[in-house]
Amino acid sequence: MSNTAQLILDGKTYELPVIEGTEHERAIDISKLRSLTGGVTTIDPGYKNTGATKSAITFLDGEKGILRYRGYSIGYSIEELAERSTFLEVAYLLIYGELPNEEQFSSWKSEITMHTMVHEEIKNILDGFPSNAHPMGVLSSLVSALTAFYPKSLDPNRSIKQVDLSIARIIAKMPTIAAWAFKNEIGHPVNYPDNTLDYCENFIKMMFATPAETYSVDPVVSDALNKLLILHADHEQNCSTSTVRIVGSSQASLYSSISAGISALWGPLHGGANQAVIEMLEGIKSSGGDTKKYLDKAKDKNDPFRLMGFGHRVYKNFDPRATIIKKAADGVLAKLGVNDPVLDIARGLEEAALKDEYFVSRKLYPNVDFYSGIIYRAMGIPTEMFTVMFTLGRLPGWIAQWKEMRENNEPIGRPRQVYTGHNSRPYMELGER
């Protein structure tokens, strides 16, 4: 294979290097294109064909249905991660590059447990939000506010020890802040962390416990949440991850960069897929619950209806995460015995679509968003909290990407444009316009 590409422009030929990754992905390096050509740039709306960085964290091949965290693949060893590891182990893997040994993991858990509490004055900020404030807006604001409580975190170049402390703090405090955003929405008093519980159990208790009665966490629900968080932990250079990296490239703090990532994830085209699944199912229920009718509508190319949670814009074959989380969804539904017509419709759609030649031939299988929406619904989590749950899972990936970008000393992000506005024109006084 050639290690250069040729660009012919205005009769001149330019040699551009071709680089290759460890999974044999190839990319044309255009980093010196402007200097070579005297100012010519490329244009790639949405950056669908542009690699903004080199990364050793996550590999994704949508055509083959491959997702790997630091080399651990779904379909082989990441299934072992989902079945045998905890979310905190996977977070350590993503952020620090290797699965922790016993000593490292014990220290890591202790550090996070130490920081689960948030400053009491955070409650004053929380109390300033109306109860109808969207929890993602609350979450983004409170994470950004952490910079005020930890001013040493403002300088990401201060020291490795300070960066590691910021990492532990945000992983520890995110479940507390997320649960408090939920409690604000429903008008309940907040719960403080219970450090006798593990990461997922603690979050579930803060979400659902009330002062009026004792609360115990169902291990089936906790295990399902652990798997969901692991499977959402990173997904290469998506919109929110790219946002975290580009904000961090300005040497913004970790908290500011994560807050920006939360805002990007909030957009319905990015983090709202599992919410869209439940909203679709509720729409089917309100119109009579006829799943066959909606399967037929989905197959009609002239009908605007789309079956949410089937297929994936990245995975063109199958979503490798879906098989793992389907098992967890089945376990949660069986254990909780939830009597919910919406979930009955979901199961009916799943069963029918997996047998329907139209969907099978087009590889339109239920994806991770379909099953995660079902699990969250069964757990009693409202749809507006679904993206908050996504945030909780994606946090280690954002941190890992921010950390890698800083360690690689990447330059500040500065995309170019092709200007299409007015040419130079004279100024006109107000009365002459």
Image (cartoon, rainbow, N blue to C red):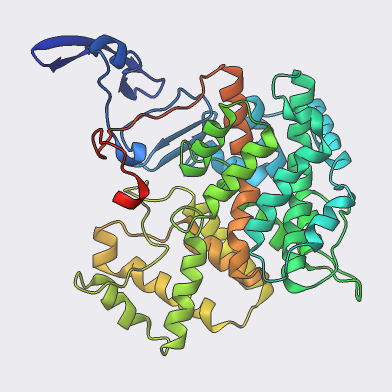
Q: Position of residue 259 (x, y in %)?
A: 64, 44
Q: Residue at x 38, y 53 (%)?
A: 312
- Left-right relation of 3 to 189: left
Residue 124 vs residue 332, the one in the foreground: 124
The location of residue 134, given as percent across then percent down, is 63, 64
Image vertical order of residue 196 relative to residue 90, above or below: below
Name the one closer to the observer, 214 or 286: 286
In the rendered image, the residue lying farthest to the bottom is 288
Position in image of residue 347 (x %, y %)? 47, 74
Location of residue 82 (image quadrant):
top right
Image location (x, y in percent) of residue 203:
77, 56
Q: Nearer the viewer, residue 421 or 393?
A: 421
Is residue 347 visible in this depiction of the protein? Answer: no
Residue drawn at point x = 66 percent, y = 26 percent? 96
From the viewer's perspective, is residue 155 above or below residue 299? above
Q: How many marks?
A: 0
126 to the left or right of 322: right
Compared to residue 130, the image places residue 423 above or below, namely: above
Res. 183 visible in picture = yes
Which residue is drawn at the image coordinates 65% and 77% (left, top)? 337
Work out whether residue 221 or residue 30 is closer to the camera in this orientation and state it: 30
Query: Residue 137 sits in which quadrant?
Result: bottom right
Query: On the image, which quarter does residue 69 sit in?
Result: top right
- Direction from residue 308 to residue 418 in the image, left or right: left
95 horizontally vs 123: left or right? left
Which residue occupies 55% across, 59% down? 327
